[in-house]
Image (cartoon, rainbow, N blue to C red):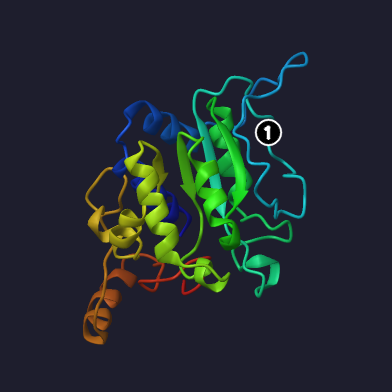
């Protein structure tokens, strides 16, 4: 399951390489490790001002590496906290961050980019969009349904991301990529690429599943995923 998820995440980066240098830097960040240089002297990192947005995380970004003084690119990692759900959603720890937020951000930082952690608060939509204009790229980590569950509108958020794209900002993944690649059968579409696995199949009827799954089970243990889902839900 871990290999499948990593390959799917990589596919989104590859599909969105409108700015090759930035896309290459982001792709490298996935496997960058955690080697970094600490800021020296009294210099402060050149970050985007997000002081007008509510800081939702309950901890002070514990584990986040120091931001680079002069980042190659400025990126934002956007999450959303759902007040009605424990911890803000099943994808989050008690810090209010997604489990993968700090590792992703550290990969970006280790590659020389800044990565600021931001929660989208629906009531602050306009201020949020204005702040996003200061970034080169936006990494969207809001699970399907979470924005609506938090009192916002997914279509309104998506339209804002498209407007930022038109201004030259990179959005990973973009709303259109999520529509076309968000379902698990997207893994079948990339099965024959270098980032895919050729023994990935989709079944759309009980008969197809019974015939195909038995054959693959005879070969090796399998991972089963429902076509739509997130946060580890619907995986056997």
Q: Residue at x 26, y 86 (%)?
A: 206
Nearer-the-camera pick, 190 or 69:
69
Name the outermost residue toward the top: 41
Q: Quadrant of residue 37?
A: top right
Secondary structure state at the residue bearing disc 1: loop
Nearer-the-camera pick, 200 or 76:
76
Q: Position of residue 61 (x, y in %)?
A: 72, 44
Q: Residue at x 49, y 33 (%)?
A: 29
How many numbered marks appear? Answer: 1
With 50 as the anchor, is 157 left or right in this view? left
With 176 as the anchor, is 151 left or right in this view? right
Q: Quadrant of residue 120?
A: bottom right
Q: Residue at x 29, y 69 (%)?
A: 216
With 54 as the anchor, is 120 left or right in this view? left
Q: Which quarter shows the N terminus?
A: bottom left
Name the outermost residue toward the bottom: 206
Position of 16 relative to 206 (above/below): above
Q: Position of residue 202 (x, y in %)?
A: 27, 70
Nearer-the-camera pick, 54 or 236:
54
For disc 1, the neighbor class at 10 Å (few under 14, some 14 to 19, many from 20) is many
Q: Quadrant of residue 228?
A: bottom left
Nearer-the-camera pick, 147 or 216:
147
- Which residue is under mark 1? 65
Q: Is residue 232 visible?
A: no
């Amino acid at each position: 399951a871990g290999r499948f998820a990593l390959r799917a995440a990589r596919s989104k980066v590859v599909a969105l390489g409108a700015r090759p240098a930035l896309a290459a830097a982001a792709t490298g960040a996935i496997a960058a490790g955690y080697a970094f240089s600490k800021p020296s002297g009294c210099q402060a990192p050149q970050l985007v001002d997000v002081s007008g947005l509510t800081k939702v995380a309950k901890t002070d970004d514990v584990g986040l590496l120091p931001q680079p003084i002069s980042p190659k690119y400025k990126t934002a990692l956007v999450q959303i906290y759902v007040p009605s759900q424990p911890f803000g959603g099943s994808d989050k720890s008690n810090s209010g961050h997604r489990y993968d937020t700090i590792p992703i951000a550290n990969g970006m930082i280790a590659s020389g980019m800044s990565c600021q952690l931001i929660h989208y608060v629906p009531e602050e939509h306009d201020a949020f969009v204005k702040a996003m204009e200061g970034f080169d790229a936006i990494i969207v980590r809001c699970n399907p349904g979470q924005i609506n569950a938090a009192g916002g509108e997914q279509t309104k958020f998506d339209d804002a991301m498209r407007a930022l794209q038109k201004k030259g900002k990179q959005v990973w993944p973009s709303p259109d990529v999520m529509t076309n690649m968000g379902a698990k059968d997207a893994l079948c579409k990339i099965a024959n690429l270098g980032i895919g696995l050729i023994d990935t199949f989709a079944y759309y009827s009980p008969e197809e599943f019974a015939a195909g799954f038995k054959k693959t089970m005879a070969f090796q243990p399998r991972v089963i995923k429902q076509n739509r889902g997130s946060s580890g839900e619907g995986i056997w």
